[in-house]
Amino acid sequence: MPDRGGKVLPTIHQAALPLDRLILTDAPDAEAVPMDVFFVGGGPAGLAGAIALARMVKADHEAGGGLGDVQIGVLEKAGALGEHSLSGAVVNPIAIRALFPELKDKDFPFRAPVAAERVYYLTESHALRIPTPPTMQNHGYYVASICEIVRWLGEKAEGLGVNIFTGFPAAALLTEGQRVTGVRTAPSGLSRTGEQGSGYTPPTDITAQITVLAEGTRGTLSQAYLEWQQIPSDNPQIFALGVKEIWETLRPLDAVVHTLGWPVPKDCFGGSFMYPLTRNLIALGIVVGLDYKRTSDDVHEMLQRMKLHPLFREILEGGEMVEWGAKTIPEGGYYALPKRRHGDGLMIVGDSAGLVEVASLKGIHYAMQSGMFAARAAFDALKRKDTSAATLKEYDTMVDGSFIAKDLHQRRNMRLTFQKNNFYVAGLKAGLMTVTAGALFGGKTESHRDAEVAREVSPPQPFTPDGKLTFSKLDAVFKSGNATRDDIPSHLIVGPDITPEVAELYAHMCPAGVYERDGDRLVVSPANCIDCKATDVIGPRWTLREGGSGPKYRQM
């Protein structure tokens, strides 16, 4: 239906997923790189899966199991492992302990155990401390940098003989009938108009008996596969946008801090965090559901305003913001899980499958555990010499019978109730769901895609960053390490009928300043993109681009 009544409906301005570019029926190139099992994405899910599989293959070989040599690969679009990884993060160590049972917690790349924690309800000038909800209690967990975890996992994988290819985005799935047979990477060295430049490198085909999609949040190939195979879910997936900063501070932070309330509007879902990494280094950020209600709602700007609150200002003032980044987070939970996360020659793991539990703000251990389950299913399939869906369904069975599905099911409606009720009623219901382990208000809550939420056209509140405590989007992008070529072809597919009001929505939606409203027209600066994928949720479609593009995170 068209925009009407002073509102913008994002879905009618969004281009369709370009399946013809993402699902290829071409035969692989004659010089294709052959692999046996290939993980697309070098994050915690893909690397944990590769490590687990390499260990199984090694144990099989030592026991004379007869499986023989197995080529395991990991493909990562960033120029180096960890450069596109971003999370809070407070980590539940259950999965990494299972992956490395011979190690102690002190051997893992964590910063520190959670020693204390506080939760506050904020108004614009006050902070009311409230009891820590059971789902947010982090005793026994660890504050960490996901960049550092990923780099550490990469070293462990390489030590086991896993082939890691960085700077190669998987731009399309290779298929034969209903079977996935591998991937084709994105070319590099193209001019803005798509012509081959002096540094042009053509796409590379990589074939595999089993392809594991570990693309992270809003995975393009995962979306394409689910749509191609017409795999449903009870509810559509919904997303939040998180914007995060790393600060060197003069004052130490002595606890993990979470907040509710201001500056997130009461009709939006979200909150903030502040975590101590070292005595003088902290991570802070804000997470807001992309089903927000106004064209002027701006998550980056909410974070900047938040830092003016006394709770944050007293810690940050006099310090320096050293790194900035953003990322979307799947929030749909149990009812948004695809009915099938496997197929002939393929499995989908981690954030790409929606394995995030919003109430506890956790996803890393689910990602790693799902990668390990995929490794077990792949190993068994190779042993049976059968990589069809009939064999790989073992992966779904393991996920569905594990703590992953149990946790998501217990809290299946806690995020969704905020789509149906005001802040206070939703908070009460979520609390009752927690104490009853999901038994109360346990029936399925219907949901809708973020792009189907109409946005009220509203003017933004004036805000001028000071460049010391608060920052513009362009200054923030510089702190992400983004070094994308200015003349790179656009990887963004802008949809139809972009009115001035839609341009305004996009300008506020993107934390990196990719979109600007110039009078009545939309101006797009693709090189600013940091691959957070918010645009793919409610704006122009995001597609894979030249390897090494985007941010170069170090401590995120």
Image (spheres, grey):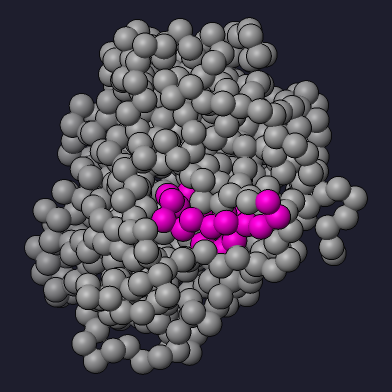
Q: Residue at x 52, y 26 (%)?
A: 465
Quick check: 238 above or below 64?
A: above
Q: Is residue 104 left or right of residue 177?
A: left
Quick check: 83 above or below 436?
A: below
Q: Is residue 61 left or right of residue 6?
A: left
Residue 247, horizontal then vertical, whole percent: 36, 23
Q: Is residue 124 left or right of residue 363?
A: right
Q: Residue at x 85, y 64 (%)?
A: 1
190 within the magenta span: no
Residue 45, horizontal then vertical, whole percent: 36, 52
Q: Quadrant of residue 276?
A: top left
Viewer-proximal residue, 499 or 159? 499
541 within the magenta span: yes
Q: Residue at x 66, y 21 (%)?
A: 261
Res 269 visible: yes
Residue 137, horizontal then vertical, whole percent: 50, 21
Q: Residue at x 72, y 43 (%)?
A: 295
Viewer-proximal residue, 11 or 357? 11
Viewer-proximal residue, 116 or 390? 116
Residue lying at the far right of the rendered structure: 5
Quick check: 257 above or below 457?
A: above
Residue 280, horizontal then vertical, whole percent: 29, 15
Magenta region: which residues? 519-542
State which quarter of the image contains the C terminus. top left
Res 376 visible: no
Quick check: 130 above or below 366?
A: above
Q: Quadrant of residue 541?
A: bottom right
